[in-house]
Amino acid sequence: MLGALTGALWALPSGSYLLLPDRAKPLAGLVSIPGERGDAKGGIYYVDVIVRKASLLERLVPQLRGDGSSLVPEHAILPPGSNESQRRQQNLNAMSVSQQVAAAVALRELGYEVAARKAGVLVASVAPDVPAAGKLQPGDVLVEVDREPVRTPAALRRAISTRKPGDTVRLGIRAGKDVRRVDIRTIADPDDASRAIVGIAVEQSVQITLPLDVKIDLGGVGGPSAGLAFALDVMEELGPSVDRGYRVAVTGELELDGNVGPIGGVKQKTIGARRTGVDVFLVPAGDNAAEARRHAGNLRIIPVKSFRQALRELATLPAKN
C-alpha cells in the first residue's frame, strides 16, 4: 500500500516546477562565421537551467528534488494564460533575438557597419482572463505608453509599474506607418499585489542587418540569457583572444546598446558552472552577482554591466599558460 501511494505521488504533477543545474557547455563549434579562427585553449561557455514539472512527492519531500534545485510556482514559469508549448516557442523566439543582438554588438565592436535598431515591444502572448484579451494580439508591436515612446520590454515594464492595479493605460500599437491606440485596464501582479501589470508576455522587437552571415545553433535551448556569451564568442572567433586561455562561463541578457541585463536561474547556473570546472563566471552585476557568489564556492565571479566591461575584465586576467 505504501509503495503504491509513493508511486502515485511520484507520478502526479504538483502544479509547481523544479529548476535544476545543468553543466556549462562550450560554444566552440556552435557559432559559425566566415573567416573565423580556431582556438584550442580556453573557450566561452554558456549555461542553462533544466526546467521541469515537479511531482507531488518532490513538492512534499525536499530531499528528493536534487542538489541545487529550486521549487517555484507555475506562474513563475508560465506567463498568465500560456501553456508549455507557447512558453517553449517564446523562449525560442527570445533566443533568436538574442543571437541577432549579440552578433550586432560584437561586430560593431570589431568595426563593422551594422544596421540595427530597437523597433518596439513584441507581444508574445496574452492571458485569456485579463482586460487586455481581445484588445492585444500576439504579434502586435507596442511603441507607446500614454503617448510616450517605448522601445524595449524594460521601458514598457517601467512605464506600467508607475500605475496602480486597476488604472487604465493607453498603449500605442504600430499599424504600418501609423499608431493605433487602445485603453487597457491593468491588473495586480500575482507575486506583488501592489504592482500593476497588463497580463502579457513580451519580447524585444528588433530590426538588424548584419554584414556577415553569423549562425548560432544551440539546438532546442531557448531564452535570452546567453546573449553576452554569444557576443564574446563572436569576438573570440574574429578578433584577438577574448578568453586569454581561460574557460569562461558567461550569462546575461545583452541589449543593442551593449548593456547587460539580469537573468533568472542564477543559483542553478552558478552551480552548473562550478561543477563543470570553468575558471571564471561572468554574470550581470547587482542582485545576480550577489546570488552567484552565494553558490560559487571557489569559482571566481566577475560582475559586469556591459559588453565592453566584460571585455575589459577578461583583458585584465593574466595570460594563461
Image (cartoon, helix red, strand yellow):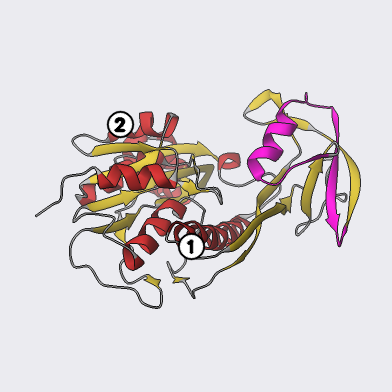
Vertical order, 240 against 302 (above or below) = below
Residue 43 location in percent, x, y?
A: 25, 59
Q: Residue at x 28, y 46 (%)?
A: 314
SS at badge 2: helix
Along the viewing direction, whichever of 261 and 222 lies nearer the viewer: 261
Task: State the image quarter where residue 129 is shown.
Answer: top right
Q: Residue at x 18, y 56 (%)?
A: 245
Q: Amino acid at mark 1?
A: Ala
SS at badge 1: helix
Task: State the image quarter where residue 39 is shown.
Answer: bottom left
Residue 37 location in percent, x, y?
A: 29, 73
Is residue 237 toward the left or the right of residue 11 in the image? left
* Pointer 1 local density, CA inside 10 Å: few below 14, some 14–19, many at least 20: many
Q: CA distance from mark 2 to mark 1?
A: 29 Å
Q: Which residue is mark 1?
A: 103
Is residue 311 toward the left or the right of residue 184 in the image? left
Q: Residue at x 53, y 72 (%)?
A: 211
* Pointer 2 local density, CA inside 10 Å: few below 14, some 14–19, many at least 20: some
Residue 186 location in percent, x, y?
A: 80, 33
Q: Quadrant of the C terminus?
A: bottom left
Q: Quadrant of the N terminus?
A: top left
Q: Earlier in the sequence, mark 2 or mark 1?
A: 1
Q: Which residue is mark 2?
A: 293
Q: Is 187 inside the magenta-drawn segment?
A: no
Along the viewing direction, whichever of 11 and 239 lies nearer the viewer: 239
Q: Is residue 267 visible?
A: yes
Vertical order, 118 against 293 (above or below) = below
Q: Which residues are magenta?
A: 148-177
